[in-house]
Amino acid sequence: MLSGVALIGLLISPAHAETTDHADHKTRPHRSNHIRTASPAHRPLPSPRKHTEVKSGSESMTVHVRRRGSHSAEEVVSRETMDHFVAGTSPMQILALTTPGANFASDDAFGLDTVANTLYVRGFNQTQLGVSLDGIPMGGQGFHNWNGLGVDQMEIQENITSLTMSQGAGALDTPSAQTLGGAITFTSSDPSDKAGGQISQLFGSYNGFRTYGRVDSGKLNSSGTKFYAAYARTDQDLWKGYGDQQEQQANFKLVQPVGDRGKITAVFDYSNFEQYNYLGLTKNMWQKMGRNTTYLKPNYELAKQYAYYAQNGGVPAGLEGVLSNDEIGDYAYDGTQTQRNYLSAITGEFQLFPNVTSKTIAYAHVSNGDYSATNPFLTSPTSQVPMAMETGHPDVRRLGFVQNFDIHAGHNNDIKTGIWYENDRFNYPMMMYEDGVNTPHSSIADFKNGTTWWSDSFNTNTFQFYLQDTYQIIPGMTVEAGFRSLLQTTHGGTSVDNTASLSDWGVYYSHPASGSLTAANAFLPHFNFDYHFLNQHEVYFDIAENMRAYDYSAQSSSGSAWSGLGSASNPAQTVFDENKKSLRPERTWNYVVGYRFNSHFFSGSADFYHTDYYNRLAAITSGSTGNTYSSFMNVGRETMNGADVAGTLRPLPGLAITNSFSWNDATYEDTHLPYNGGYVSIKGKHQVYYPKFMYKADVSYTWHHATFNFNTTYTSARQMTYTNDEQIPAYWTSNLNVAYDFGKVGFAQKLKTSFGITNLYNQNYIGGVYGAASVAGDDNANLFVAAPREFFGTIAAQF
């Protein structure tokens, strides 16, 4: 470790996109001088010593970019486009491969690993975007959401009919308390009017296996009652190391028409995601030890040896000058995650009057899991093995409702208004389980007799109101003006702290703090102008102010007002109470101006955007040189300018060639950032983890029943420190997919086969990032190597 170099939280606030999600809850006790970003952490990170780490995958012709209403520019990915990717591929990965300004990276071919998944849209990461499914708020899309549910757990991919990304300031009617940039909306399919079904089976590299089945009831009676039930199972061995990745999902949807006045829809979604994690690496570990470096399991004796060196200094024989002692501590024996989610909702859509429609959604979401990792800085008391299994058992319960009204006031006016309320209860107990002399504790089972280290509990109430008016000035020209009001209050913090009584485990300061914080803004305006002229041309601009409510997270993580505060000599509660006097929610002003052209032969677009980011919140090292402690405060501003240019050429029937180029210049404005008892300037330094340039090309060709698709993406170097002295190297990645539709075969109405290759040229590159960005130097094991080339074949049928 570089002396005096601290970790700046990954997302300098979840609005900074400096990180990708949440913070690490395991730390070496003496490493407390860090700068962390605001974003909660609930994962058993592979680098247990650092509690300071925060975390912040087509066919061109069927990717339509269009304007909806008078909102900012929108990119729409259709069901047909998703069908041209390997079955089960994350919609976020497909979005990034087909859309300018979006960047997605992971460490598995499907893009399902919630630890490593890293999505950015014009500088904002997945915890800073508004996300909804059929109008149901889904919260941030990061690892183990404390306030939401990731798309890969909320809906089977085949049941999503489309996804729409607003690259501007988002939409006023999006129910979200974390939006600082745009918004992503997912639409699920309705049951078919005709009875039938679908099945598909995938086989692929590393024993890849995916089964999908769906049954549609068709209309059951004269009132039009219909439903579908669907199930999917995805299973694949890890491409390096021990273990596998598997997910089971079930979706049920019932639609009941109510005469000609509307309909009632009921949904129930279930998912169970289990994975042996990949190990996060430093850049040096990746370069010196290779892309296959991962957890030490099943070599238990080697893991104990590494743990001994981690606690006592030095490195194993043969690694002198190759790895540092800190990097030896980044290795661990094992790391796993299990996520269980249950989502249910009832939606009523009715035409109350000839000019008034209503949509009411009542929803409930329950989530729980087991997040385990071997911690080589603890000691199992009975066996005296220099490590122990540390497992978080978080649970989330969200209850809420959304009420929207659409009022047509005359021929030229469309008024929309609505409210959203949600209560979120989040509990996070941290347990420790002893490792034996010869046998480790299981990381996926036997969680009955653990020792409670600490436990946190939070309760959050969120209320949002919006009002907007869309006025048609002349045919093709509309102007929209409106605002939203947002109020969120969180009560909670440490409910149990047994640190003082657990010295035989070698536990360290756990930063207990409790209290309440409120984020409120009564007027967040949004203005949009849109003009379609001469049939093929469109210009638009969009301006909006957004605010993000405060994050909360486990006490030993970082990046929130409750987490990782103080020191043993300066209690976290004292620091929390002091911070509360000056904290303000993060805000952004977003500006977008653009132009589109669309014809049968060519479609093109170009837009420019600018963002001013205020009240950037971060966990930092405060105090004098001789008495430093972890705090949480406003650390300055960030300014972002960017542009996206895209064009699709269709020279022949069935052939589409798409190229896009994205540029982003996001720079920090801090000149006196408090750090380690002094100050450091990062003014003019580029935002970490987001590329400055991206280039995407896609060629698709459909001939009779055959489809060919090739896409490639260039991602420029990403800064991995706030002083920009270390970079994640640039890379190219490409995918190839071919498919053939046999049409009706026997009793199958449609029989289709497809073959796909991911990472076509087997590039060795860093994909996802989960963890804090250092001020300087290659200090954090938060880089995840992308999966190598893999092959997949699928056969699917509809009945």
Image: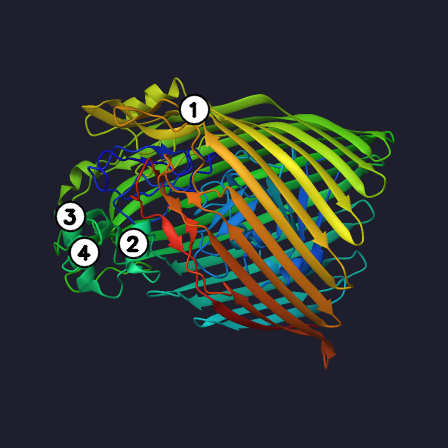
Mark in the foreground, 3 or 1: 1
- Residue at disc 2, secondary structure: helix
According to the image, what is the colour scheme of the structure?
rainbow
| Residue beneath the point at 27% across and 63% down | 297
Mark 1 surroundings within 10 Å by alpha-carbon count, few (fewer than 14), some (14 through 19), many (20 or more): some
- Residue at disc 3, secondary structure: helix
Left or right side of 129 for 324:
left
The image quadrant where one finds the N terminus is top left
Amino acid type at image mark 2: Met
Mark 4 surroundings within 10 Å by alpha-carbon count, few (fewer than 14), some (14 through 19), many (20 or more): many
Choose the circle earlier in sequence order: 3 or 1.
3
Choose the circle earlier in sequence order: 4 or 3.
4
| Residue beneath the point at 23% across and 33% down | 4
Q: Residue 562 or 217: which is nearer the viewer?
A: 562
Q: Residue 76 or 317: which is nearer the viewer?
A: 317
Which residue is label 4 attached to?
A: 306
Residue 636 numbered tag:
1
Residue 199 occupies which quadrant of the picture? bottom right
Which residue is label 3 attached to?
A: 311
Mark in the foreground, 4 or 1: 1
Choose the circle earlier in sequence order: 1 or 2.
2
Q: Residue 293 or 155: which is nearer the viewer?
A: 293
Which residue is label 2 attached to?
A: 285
